[in-house]
Amino acid sequence: MRETIEIAKEVLKNNRRSGYTLPTNNELYPAQWNWDSAFISLGYSYFNLEYAIVELEKLLSGQWDDGMIPHILFHENDESYFPNHKTWDCGNKIPSSGITQPPIIATIIKKIVDQNKLNQSQLKRMKTIIKKLKKYLDWFFNYRDINKIGLVSIIHPWESGLDNSPIWDSSLDKVKIEENLKYERRDLNVSRSSNRPLKKDYDGYITLLNQFKKDKYNPSKIVNDSLFNVIDIGFNSILIRATKDLVEVAKKFNLDFTDLKNKISKSEESLIRFYKDEEQSFFSYDFKNHNLIKIDTISNYFVLFANLQNEDINNKIINKLKEYNSQTEYFFTTVNPKDKTFEETRYWRGPVWINTNWIIYQGLLDKDKNFSNLIKNKTLELLENKKFHEYYNYKTGDCLGANNFSWSAALYLDLKLNN
Ligand code: DGY
């Protein structure tokens, strides 16, 4: 459907600012977000490779000296968002948040390099990008792999990208909320409160932020002091895939990342320990409070994206995934509708998101061709009928959250145009 392709490109072009692209054109997210930008870059690669590379370079321009790539960069010093650069107060040359997001960027770069013919100067720039990404992945293993098991902790729900997923509920409930906490939310001015996180979630988010600020964002100190520490299955699956993809793509640039490659088998072995045969599921682990978080969410199936060398487990979770949304018109819901925490319209607690579908689709490509095709076709059908929103109602496909959402448009281009 040519028309939808053109609309997708328009969405990206209209959301583009000076070298980077907003997640949406309303005022909900007026800055550059880490994993949004990576998905967006993949979308551009189908019609403007230069935009794709510039998007990544702009994101990497905000990399911290220690290697971290922040979850938000506030290039314009815009203060309409909360928490903005003043609240974070990180003291960097490019104002940013002080936490990160899933490193999907490595996989995206491998795809862009594999699928395109880069000219000499683009190859040179890509090599610089890849070296910076090596520093980013090293940062995870240096500072977030606390027990040196090859798996990392997230120390804030925002790091997961799935902000208010019920995975974080019990851990966040145990965070002692700062006394006299004062802040003013801006998201509710531009979005329905029935779609957004609750006040109690924000109280936790801001208490954690204030602790990191007190620690001056020292990467070791904030991990030690954090009142929230979760080994998240979704995040670690993306990281394992990122590690594999970065090592592979680096070879094309004569870069030897053997030290990174050596981490893979340990990460895989450790991840498999979080597979529970009784439920045939992976579950995230609350490292702070020592408990397994037994909630059936789509991000537990991101393990497929990690490409574990374990056919038996992969097959078991594929079978379970086939049941996950067996009764629903659209899929995948972010939380299993049978779970008591499921909420039809609230952000990451139920609605269908395009990036989670894309991750699962990528994970199934070489494991179950029919199922992966079904996911691709259902996702394309949803996007062609309803166009590019932030998230969707699983019963009606209706739009939830923001319109003209960049990663929905970008990933449409990938699903549609990638052969
Ligand atoms: C928000 O403001 O909802 C963002 O997801 C935080 O990263």
Image (cartoon, grey):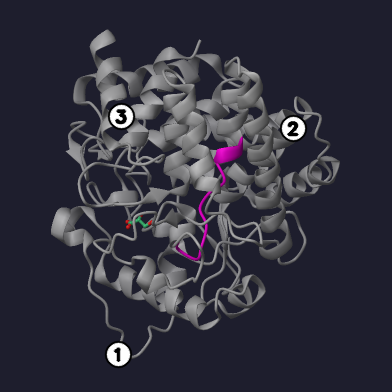
Q: Secondary structure at mark 2?
A: helix
What is the spatial separation of the Cα atoms under label 3 and label 1, in whole angstroms?
43 Å
Q: Which residue is mark 2?
A: 250
Give the residue type that dot 2 points to.
Ala
Q: Which residues are magenta?
A: 96-106
Q: Main secondary structure of the magenta part?
A: loop
Measure the C-alpha gap from mark 2 to mark 1. 49 Å
* Vertical comparison of 56 with 163: above or below: above
> Is the N terminus in the top left, top right, bottom left or bottom right quadrant?
top left
Residue that label 1 marks: 180
User: With respect to residue 263, does 208 lie above or below?
Assistant: below
Asked if disc 1 is less than 8 Å from ligand 1, the answer is no
The residue singled out by tag 3 in the image is 13
- Residue in the picture at 42% in, 71% down: 88
24 or 120, nearer to the observer? 120
The nearer-to-camera label among 2 and 3 is 3
Residue in the foreground of this view, choosing between 273 and 84: 84
Disc 3 crowd, CA 10 A, few/some/many (<14, 14-19, 20+): some
Instruction: Give coordinates of residue 60: x percent, y percent.
Output: 55, 47
